[in-house]
Amino acid sequence: YQLGIVFIIISVVLFIVSITI
C-alpha cells in the first residue's frame, strides 16, 4: 500500500472536479 499512489489519485480527482465546476 503506497501513499504516493493514493496522493496522485486524489490530486487527479480534485483536478477533474475543478475543471467540471
Image (spheres, helix red, strand yellow):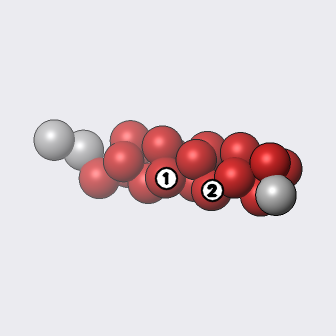
> Could you tell me which residue is drawn at 38 percent across and 41 percent down?
5
Q: Residues within 10 Å of mark 2 (few under 14, many from 20)?
A: few
Name the secondary structure under disc 2.
Answer: helix
Q: Which mark is residue 10?
A: 1
| Res. 4 visible in picture | yes
Side of 2 where 10 appears, left or right: right
Quadrant in the picture for residue 18: bottom right
Q: Nearer the viewer, residue 7 or 20?
A: 20
Check the picture and name the quadrant holding the N terminus: top left
Mark 2 in CB contact with mark 1 (< 8 angstroms): yes
x, y (%) of residue 21? 82, 58
Side of 21 where 14 appears, left or right: left
x, y (%) of residue 17? 69, 52
| Total numbered badges shown on the rendered structure | 2
Disc 2 designates what residue?
14
Name the secondary structure under disc 1.
Answer: helix
x, y (%) of residue 15? 71, 52
Residue type at numbered disc 2: Leu
Marks 2 and 1, how far apart at CA: 6 Å
| Res. 15 visible in picture | no
Residue type at numbered disc 1: Ile
